[in-house]
Structures are given as C-alpha cells and as structure tokens.
Amino acid sequence: MDDQEAFSWQIGTGICRGKVCRSHLASSPLPSGQLAKLAEEAFGWKKTTSFTVLKRLCNRGIFQNEKGIVSPLISRDAFYARHSEQCVDEAFGGSLPAFVAAFCSRKRLKDSEIAELEQVIAEMRRQNDAL
C-alpha cells in the first residue's frame, strides 16, 4: 500500500480516523484498551467503534498494534503533511495557490504570517535550485 492510499479518507469515517490520529500521535504508544477509553472520553465512542477505527488505521499503515500496544508508524508531521495534501487535492484540484486564495478571501493574513509564507517560498526555491 502506498502513502496516497494510506491517507485516502472518506467523509464521516475519515473525520473520525483523523481525530484518532491527531489524538494518538500526541500520546503514544498506548495499550489498545487505554486508547479505546480515551476515544470514549473524547468522542463518546463505544469500545467496538474504537477498535474498528484502530484496525482500519493499522491496515492503512498509520499505526501498528503489537500485542495490544498501539504506536504510530508515521510522525505527526508526516500525518499532517499528507492530510493537508489530500485536502488540497480533493477540494482545489491539487492547486495550492487556489487554496491560499480561497483561504485569504475569508481571513485577512497578518503581516507576520505573510512574511512567514514568503520565507517558506524562498526556502522552497532554494531547494528547487539545488536539484
């Protein structure tokens, strides 16, 4: 299974899996029973729902469950990067400029945010030039 398949999310259950990923990437490894308790407290899920979602995440290569201990197979940064890529792909046809334009049409960026984005773009240009 490639990375793109591992982050192929569906509306509804995809959002639930995303909640588990964000929650668990910050507090792992954990026994699966403890993870189910945390999901019950945070999301109101029954134990069976938690284990079903966990199994799907393990099948997608995001987590592993070894002898009842659940730990991530990817970093939190990698999770957010892939999730962001998928959102841009699905909602904006893969166009990052279209995403930024849509975002900025509803929220005014601060000068400090614009400066930070300019630094990110400059770094990307340096990396592209190095290739």
Image (cartoon, rainbow, N blue to C red):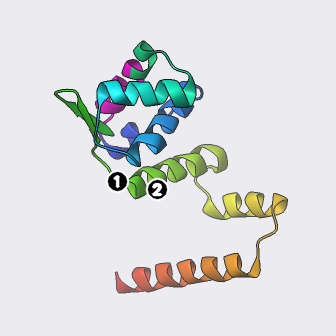
**Lower position in the chain sequence, tag 2 or tag 1:** 1
Asked if 75 appears above or below 101 in the picture, the reply is: above
The picture quadrant where one finds residue 104 is bottom right
Q: Which residue position holds label 2?
A: 81
Q: Secondary structure at mark 2?
A: helix
Left or right side of 104 for 12: left
What crowding class fits label 2: few (fewer than 14 Cα within 10 Å), some (14-19), or many (20 or more)? few
How many numbered callouts? Answer: 2
Q: Quadrant of the C terminus?
A: bottom left
Q: Secondary structure at mark 1?
A: loop
Please state the horizontal and vertical placement of residue 60, each as a whole percent of the image.
33, 33
Q: Are marks 2 and 1 in contact (CB under 8 Å)?
A: no
- In the rendered structure, which segment of residues is drawn in magenta? 51-61
Q: Is residue 11 visible?
A: yes
Please state the horizontal and vertical placement of residue 84, each as a whole percent of the image.
54, 52
Q: Amino acid at mark 2?
A: Ala
Query: Residue 67 bears which disc, if any?
Result: none
Q: Amino acid at mark 1?
A: Ser
Q: At x 32% / y 24%, what residue is drawn? A: 33
Q: At x 52% / y 46%, what residue is drawn? A: 86
Q: Which residue position holds label 1?
A: 75
For the residues labelled 2 and 1, the Cα–Cα distance comes to: 10 Å
Q: At x 50% / y 48%, what residue is drawn? A: 83
The picture quadrant where one finds residue 36 is top left
